Image: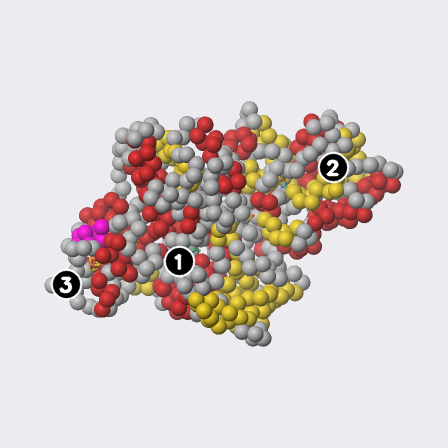
Amino acid sequence: MYRIIKKEILNPDVELMVVHAPYVARKCEPGQFIILRVDEDGERIPLTIADYDRKKETVTIIYQVVGYSTKKLSNKNEGDFINDFVGPLGQPAPIHKVKRVLGIGGGVGIAPLYPQMKKMKDLGVQVDVLLGGRTNKHIIMENMFEEFVDNIYYATNDGSKGIKGFVTDKLLELLENGEKYDLVVAIGPLVMMKAIVNITKENNIKTNVSLNPIMIDGTGMCGGCRVTVGGETKFACVDGPDFDGFLVDFDECMQRQSMYKEEEEHICRIGIGDGNNA
Amino acid sequence: MPNLSKVKTPIREQEPDIRNKNFEEVVLGYTEEEAIEEAGRCLQCKHKPCMNGCPVNVPIPEFINQVSKGNFEEAYKVITRENVLPAICGRVCPQENQCEGKCVRGKAGEPVAIGRLERFVADWHMNNIKNKKEDIESNNIKIAVVGAGPAGLTCAFELAKRGYKVTLFEALHTPGGVLSYGIPEFRLPKSLVRNEIKKIEDLGVELITNVIVGKSITIDELFEEGYMGVFVGSGAGLPKFMKIEGENLNGVYSANEFLTRVNLMKAYKKDSSTPVKVGKKVAVVGGGNVAMDAARTAKRLGAQEVYIVYRRSEEELPARVEEVHHAKEEGIIFKLLNNPVKINGKDGWVESMECIKMELGEPDSSGRRRPVAIKESNFKLDLDTVIMAIGQTPNPLIRQTTPGLKTENWGGIIVDEDTMKTTKDDVYAGGDVVTGAATVILAMGAGKKAAKAIDEHLKNN
Ligand SMILES: Cc1cc2nc3c(=O)[nH]c(=O)nc-3n(C[C@H](O)[C@H](O)[C@H](O)COP(=O)(O)OP(=O)(O)OC[C@H]3O[C@@H](n4cnc5c(N)ncnc54)[C@H](O)[C@@H]3O)c2cc1C
Ligand SMILES: Cc1cc2nc3c(=O)[nH]c(=O)nc-3n(C[C@H](O)[C@H](O)[C@H](O)COP(=O)(O)OP(=O)(O)OC[C@H]3O[C@@H](n4cnc5c(N)ncnc54)[C@H](O)[C@@H]3O)c2cc1C
Ligand code: SF4
Ligand code: SF4
Ligand code: FES
Ligand SMILES: [Mg+2]
């Protein structure tokens, strides 16, 4: 059992938890993730490691409440326990020293962007970030980024923070203004990553993306997380989750992610008694 | 006067048409009377040929003798001197190739039903006797066992019995390995697996779930933490795919994923939070136990037509004879001598599978006749779901993070067959991670052999 040390509500849909998980905290690196089961009969859901503290043996997760299991997780509070919490899973993000990087985070994808950008800054990279969300309420962690980045830009659907529009609109504007980047790291919904790659490919800027296919074990045992990268099948849980965006078959990823849409809605409707956010 | 019947005492089973709609156990087991009657068929051969067929040396005539006298608890003690998981082995060992394959009664008629008797004894004990915690004097030597499948469980048990302080690390949230995530409830009830594992924990073995050795901690780090020996029993969990067109369509599963969703995550229960999709028409590709389990599971989840598509003929089916028999009774349709070439999709979902007919040619390196495609014999099966059950290889996590550990090209850990010692000092390995996908009893045999070698090595140093 894994104790919840701290819980914080970041916005109407997104919450943060600091969890005591010594085996994960000792070894994890940016880009890796964990799998948890909220309770005895729970499903296994993957969440990115947003931050960690090796001394306190804790791991931070930031999750968006979207369905049955994230709702159940959201019902837990400080001092409660999570039944299972395993990791670190996946490969660390491929972080090298480049001159200048642009990190683009959409929605809850902002969370996994944070440890990668922080580590790049530590390596002496110039770091700009572009954060996007539906409204200003949906942009998380901006204070944490503002502490270390060189430039920070925002895009919201309603213009309540930064430009009114998508992160791709802002990206195009930056490139038109002559900003030069050696690398883009894009983490967010598949449609967003696909749209970004369409732009960066044209401009020939190497782009890493983080894929989030449906997973069970996270150790290479089920093959459910397979994705096509460069024409080859990869298991995102062991070969990824970060891949070269130019090589990813995004349409297949989107198709596979929707495999259980009906069942998920059904399970969620059955509800969990005191489920709030419904 | 021994029981001279040429056939095994029949065993009660659920009716095929009823059981293919539920997840209750198929085989119901012997009553005390039936067990005594079947035990009477054993000739108590002096040279014990049956025992040569048992990788863990169960004293077969000795336990059967106790059964024939109605001394069931004595029989249990005899079996568990050598075999810590009798309720499991009695159910899933391929007895026809193991103990029963060597039984002299099999020369004229059916062999003694050793597996059924072993199962009976284990179940009788479970239902009638309360396990007592044994007190074993600890020698305070720490050993780490990686993976709580049959190999790891057996190795942990054997070492704990000898006084070692054993920590068993398991990657999943539940121990048991394939016994928990692969073999279905209707063949091996999970309550029984839990019960067998509890016996091992009662001996003082510390089980830590949710630790992936190679990720959460490396083998070198285990030694730094004071472990004096490591046994790797991490199995062969990585599923193979055919690398044919359409394999990433929605509706294509590896057998591992399909069975894990249903067994480990309990997707067969209506209120499970883990979903599974079955559809009306399902093809399972492969002919082993894994394929039979996937097919019978799909049927139970409501699929109307379930096919086994296998490229060789009935004779070469690697599954246990009993599983093939049960699958047929339950209405699984065998499409033998057929090989998939392509999966067709519509809107991203499986719609059909194109297969080609095969014929048997010259024998290959395995001695089995090689299947050869018959030109222009392609045909289409309309399907919603395809389940690939064509084999597994060892997961790379451990070999990638353990310098000095030599492996075969296909990923199997290389060991000395007498001691199960690997190329790295104080690291032993056994089970599917060494042999590739094999059997429960061979994995147990390897775990047992390694425990003995570890003990001898540490005692002499
Ligand atoms: C490597 C990885 C890292 C992730 N990191 C984060 C993160 O840091 N924060 C965050 O909010 N979300 C993250 N996700 C997504 C998160 O796992 C899903 O949102 C969660 O599983 C939804 O579960 P649910 O039961 O609440 O919702 P459901 O209603 O069951 O599902 C909603 C959607 O979530 C996805 N999903 C469902 N089950 C799974 C599953 N077992 N594995 C993966 N995706 C699934 C599907 O797209 C589904 O349509 C990550 C996913 C992956 C693969
Ligand atoms: C569906 C199916 C049906 C089968 N039916 C039969 C049958 O009827 N009869 C029969 O004899 N055999 C059968 N088999 C084969 C048999 O189950 C295996 O040969 C046997 O389980 C191998 O045992 P093992 O201990 O080597 O590995 P496994 O049972 O695979 O156990 C390995 C364990 O190690 C864990 N692990 C893996 N990597 C790590 C790591 N890095 N760190 C920590 N833990 C790790 C895994 O999660 C797993 O729990 C079947 C197999 C399957 C898949
Ligand atoms: S353990 Fe398996 S092989 Fe050995 S006697 Fe029992 S059923 Fe036969
Ligand atoms: S070979 Fe058969 S008959 Fe002979 S002792 Fe063994 S089980 Fe009994
Ligand atoms: S999640 Fe099962 S193989 Fe990746
Ligand atoms: Mg869910």
Q: What residue is shown at x 20% (from left), y 52% (from top)? A: B63
What percent of the width, then of the height, locates residue B296?
Answer: 44, 63
Does the stretch in magenta take in B9? Answer: no
Magenta stretch, main secondary structure class: helix
Spatial separation of the CA atoms under disc 1 and disc 3 = 33 Å
Q: To which residue does mark 1 refer?
A: B186
Point out the residue furthest to the left here: B1
Residue A207 image label: none
Residue stretch rendered in magenta on the structure? B59-68
Q: To which residue does mark 3 refer?
A: B2
- Kind of element beneath mark 1: loop
- Kind of element beneath mark 3: loop
Q: What residue is shown at x 71% (from left), y 32% (from top)? A: A97
Mark 2 residue type = Gly
Tell me, yes or no, whether dots 2 and 3 are on the same chain.
no
Does the stretch in magenta take in B66? Answer: yes
